[in-house]
Image (tube, helix red, strand yellow):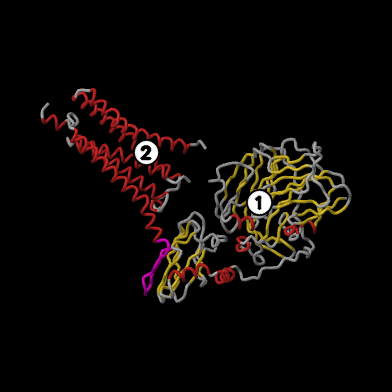
Amino acid sequence: MLDLWSLVRFLHVVGAVVWLGGQLTVSALVMPVARDRLPPEARAGLMRVLGMRFGIATVAVLIPLQVATGIALARHKGVTMASLAQPGYGRMLAGKLVAFALVMLAAGLHGWAIAAGRRTLARSLAVSALAGSFVVVLLATALPVT
Amino acid sequence: MTTTDQRVDPLAEPGPAQDRAGLLGGLALGAVMLVVAITVALTGGGARSGVDSRAVVTAGGTQSVAVSLAGMRITPPVIEVTRGTRLVLKVTNADAMRHDLVLATGQHTALLTGGQSATLTVGVVNAAIAGWCSVPGHKAAGMTLSIVLTGTGTAASSAVKAHGSGPGMAAMSKGVAAGQATPVIDFHASPEPGWTPYDPALQPAPGATQHRLTITARDTVVEVAPGVRQKLWTFNGTAPGPTLHGKVGDVFTITFVNDASMGHGVDFHAGSLAPDLPMRTIEPGKSLTYQFVAKYSGAWLYHCSTMPMALHIANGMYGAVIIDPPDLPAVAHEFVVVQSELYLGPQNGTADEAKIAAEKPDAILFNGYVNQYDHAPIRVRVGQRVRVWVVDAGPQRATAFHVVGAQFDTVFKEGAYLLKAGNAEHGASQVLDLAPAQGGFVEFVLPQAGHYPFTDHAMVDGARGAHGIFQAF
């Protein structure tokens, strides 16, 4: 039924889509094209601005949105700290939360690595954040529907 | 560009080797995340269920074991104890509904609400002890516990023995269940003077399109056959519960109150809605509002929605909702017959779960009493049209509703007319067959004065209580 909880779930899914889609767009589309078409200075400037904006959007909007809607949905579903330890739904959700935390850690470290000039590390962290985001989505789809 | 620039702006000059290293490193890190997340998601469960299946208590002294009651299971289901160990159980109800833990030794916890805990001191264990939840139906649903001795044969075989010792467990539960013998139904006996039958007449639908009523679940001692009484769980004191009657499009707002001694719920087939909230089980003293729109005509069942439903229905928690199809003509006589099964427990006790599981009813009832309308025949006028609504409440058996000496010229079953008077085929019907929870009506005219038995034409069931008489005058 279409109700308030459909809207909350919608926001949660859209948040995930924007986060994953944004990373994918930057890594798989913008980066290669910028490399081919832009002079190094312009490219560096573009990537820095894009990275900054995506980072700010993530911290200011996406993380609060995902955490708030996620907690609301979990409460609505009757998830408790104890039930996170139980096999099935609880464990699957716990795994997803761990993956989400790791992804956000990698994304944060990516920003630090850029600032510190650790280029290869920065790239590794960006790729791992992208790959980890797919793990989050995979576990989300594996959550048993009840 | 200077080297300093290169460090400040690291993305400026990527080398292919660095790129590859970055990509591979990222993928490796991603794989690590996958492994960590999947490990959290999957392995915890395995280890936990291993612990759940059996608790082994260290030998000697006083040992305490945490026992959890939830989801129709007692966890751990088996506790292995070395002979002579003094055992203490820390029992927690981790469920939304109420549970307790009763041991074959007679020791028991209080009835625990969700989140409540109690300590049960078993004492020195020198023999296997069976345990269970005494809330009706929960033991049959699997809420059992076996305390077994280590070193008396293999632990596994003693556990199986404790689980499977049918006679032992049955004897224990009988002892708990008041220790009375099950009464025997005399199908030829007559009720005492002063007995009143369940009124089979269908009351006309009220003119208003909004129906508001309160249905209260209670424990009620009810006579189900001459001299045989059961403590039924009822809707408003009778089984079947009150018949609701309305028209297509009517709105029913029911306040469901639980005044019984255990959790109950209600499920109205006459409306369509998400079961989660309205059909939830509520504990004694609580109430809920259940609102549905009768979008479709039919003879609908309503019943208790609490597990195990077979037991709750068998112990009286069923009734009918009649929604007239549009333009249903008025008739001289209109009745409702709800068929159900009786799985007799001890006198003044509740239904026998073993008989339900074995599908061995003691009797089949029309409107809740053995051969009810043999003792109080339903009087109808010769030559007048009679409409009988029939609902099969079950919980398990179908019906083949038949009126001896009559032919049905109109049959309506599960939302459609199978037959209408004056049809081109000049056809008529002899039996209305209904699976459990189905409903419909038949119409007929009795041609001359006399006694027209009506029965479940599944003859074994017709001979054990599903029988009555229309007396035409």
- Chain of residue at mark 1: B
Say whether residue B238 is visible: no
Q: Is residue B417 left or right of residue B137?
A: right
Q: Residue at x 40, y 65 (%)?
A: B55
Query: Image height check: is B53 above or below A117?
Result: below
Magenta stretch? Answer: B51-67
Q: Percent from the top left, x then y, of residue B408?
A: 79, 45
Q: In the picture provided, is A137 more to the left or to the right than B472? A: left
Three-letter code for the amino acid on which mark 2 is drawn: Gln
Residue B60 included in the magenta stretch of the image: yes
Measured along the vertical axis of the image, is residue B355 above or below residue B409?
Answer: below
The x, y position of residue B280, in whole percent, is 55, 49
Residue B360 percent across, percent down from the top left: 65, 62
Mark 2 burial class by Cα count in 10 Å: few <14, some 14-19, many 20+: some
Q: Which image quarter: residue B310?
A: bottom right
Examine the rendered structure and indicate whether residue B61 appears above or below residue B375: below
- Distance of label 1 from label 2 (alpha carbons): 47 Å
Q: Which residue is mark 1?
A: B436
Image quarter of residue B24 = top left
The residue where tag 2 is placed is: A66
- Tell me the crowding category of disc 1: few under 14, some 14 to 19, or many 20 or more residues within 10 angstroms, Cα based: some
**Mark linked to residue B392:** none
- For the residues tagged 1 and 2, is the chain the same? no
Residue closer to the observer: B75 or A38 = A38
Position of residue A113 measured from the top left corner of the image (x, y, whole percent): 20, 37
Under tag 1, what secondary structure? loop
Q: Chain of mark 2?
A: A
Tell me if residue B33 can be seen. yes
Helix, strand, or loop for circle 2? helix
Q: In the picture provided, is B359 more to the left or to the right than A15?
A: right
For residue B10, what is the image quadrant? Answer: top left
**Is label 1 in contact with label 2 (beta carbons under 8 Å)?**
no
